[in-house]
Image (cartoon, rainbow, N blue to C red):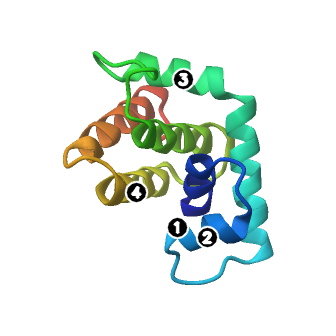
């Protein structure tokens, strides 16, 4: 998730540049990079669907009004919840960890709430 996060915020930068900015503790494998590419291309292909979900579950907020970092975290998490076999708890934990590190002090709380509401409502627990 961290590589995808850095890539989505970094635009079309080369992986080398994105990885330097991401402060990852180890160099990603080819599988890691392929996984990140899959997430980034999936988010780009399903962006409207992901933003509609964010709009549905973010009370009093819309995707357009969210800070960009928060929006990227939510898009990644919703994409993984919809299109991967990753456990929902792991997806939410990773999203919360990213939010605690890169967002405002309380962003992680509403990111956790938005994703938790979706998981409970859709029975993806």
The residue under the point 46% across, 25% down is 54
Q: Is residue 92 above or below residue 1?
A: above
| Residue corresponding to mark 4 | 98
| Viewer-side residue, 68 vs 107 | 68
In the rendered image, which residue does mark 3 sit on? 51
Q: Indicate the quadrant where residue 65 lies.
A: top left
Q: Secondary structure at mark 1?
A: helix
Q: Do the residues under discs 1 and 4 have CB atoms within 8 angstroms?
A: no
Q: Which residue is mark 2?
A: 19
First along the sequence among labels 2 and 3: 2
**Element type where label 3 sits in the image:** helix
Which residue is label 1 attached to? 22
Residues under numbered marks 1 and 2 in contact, where contact means CB atoms less than 8 Å apart: yes
Is 2 above or below relative to 76? below
Q: Position of residue 82 (x, y in %)?
A: 62, 36
Distance CA(mark 2)–CA(mark 4): 15 Å
Q: Horizontally, is 26 left or right of 73 in the view? A: right
């Amino acid at each position: 998730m961290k590589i995808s996060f850095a890539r989505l915020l970094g635009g079309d930068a080369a992986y080398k540049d994105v990885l330097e900015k991401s402060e990852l503790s180890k160099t990603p494998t080819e599988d890691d990079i392929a996984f990140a590419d899959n997430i980034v291309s999936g988010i780009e292909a399903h962006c409207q669907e992901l933003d509609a979900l964010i709009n549905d579950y973010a009370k009093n907020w819309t995707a357009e009004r969210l800070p960009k970092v928060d929006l990227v975290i939510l898009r990644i998490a919703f994409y993984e919840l919809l299109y991967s076999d990753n456990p929902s708890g792991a997806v939410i934990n990773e999203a919360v960890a990213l939010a605690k590190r890169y967002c405002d002090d309380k962003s992680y709380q509403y990111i956790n709430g938005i994703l938790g509401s979706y998981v409970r409502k859709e029975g993806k627990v």
